[in-house]
Image: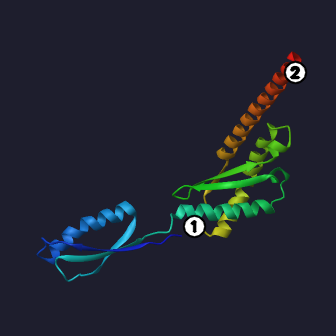
Amino acid sequence: MYAAAVRFDLHIPQSRSLKVKRAAIRPIVDGVRHRFRVSVAEVGYQDQWQRGRERMTSARRYPRTARVNEVMLEVLADELERMSDPRLELVTFTGVDVSRDLAHAKVYYSTLAATAVDTRDSIPGEVATALQSAGSHLRGVVGRQMRIRQVPRLDFVIDPGIVSGQRIEDLLREIHHREASTGESGGAGEEEDV
């Protein structure tokens, strides 16, 4: 958590009344408040016409949805460890993205079972089916542990970062295999020439 506080003094030499001073300061304060999302208040020189002292502080630590995402990921991961479905043994929740109105939540997951077994096509389907069938149970757990008024509908999505990383790893492995096979055939040809 980051906290910041700034105090600044304003000098308005053309001001001849408090009304003119406040009319000059208001657009500055509103612009700072809306641009940086901070709270701004006049803290000094309220009775002087040509001077103003303003203080800015951070308005929020971070958005509510970010806090909900973090807590929901922790609750879901804990409950996933307690579940006894064998299709979910090698599943890991990697992130949660809750909509602003808390109606929907995308739960990102990855599974190691696809790399451990040669039948890659059937395992992701089984995992998706298992997560969909466990969705109502997981939603109930989220509602009980987080105590939020509206519990979002959970949509389970394979983490695209994990899939991209696995694809890059496969490509690198293929390039390395090609270079190794080219190096072996090139080395054998040189020995025959000597």
Tag 1 residue: 149
Instruction: Please say whether residue 37 is visible from this viewpoint.
Output: yes
Could you say whether the residue bearing mark 2 is in a helix, strand or loop? helix
Please say if 52 is above or below 80. Answer: below
What is the crowding at mark 1: few (fewer than 14 residues within 10 Å), some, or many (at least 20)?
A: few
Identify the image quadrant of the C terminus: top right
Q: How is the image coloured?
A: rainbow
The furthest residue to the top? 193
Front one among 46 and 6? 6
Could you say whether the residue bearing mark 1 is in a helix, strand or loop? loop
Front one among 137 and 190? 190
Q: Residue at x 60, y 58 (%)?
A: 152
Front one among 33 and 73? 33
Please state which amino acid type lies under the numbered disc 1.
Arg
Please say if 57 is above or below 87. Answer: below
**Quadrant housing residue 85:** bottom right
Tag 2 residue: 191
Please say if 156 is above or below 44. Answer: above
Please state which amino acid type lies under the numbered disc 2.
Glu
Using residue 123 as the reference point, say whether residue 77 is left or right of it: left
Identify the image quadrant of the N terminus: bottom right
Q: Residue at x 77, y 42 (%)?
A: 124
Measuring from the top left, give residue 160's x and y in whole percent. 65, 44
Find the distance from the CA under tag 1 to the CA under tag 2. Answer: 76 Å
For marks 1 and 2, give the one nearer the viewer.
2
Give whichever of discs 1 and 2 has the lower sequence position: 1
Front one among 89 and 40? 40
Measuring from the top left, give residue 176's x and y in whole percent. 76, 33
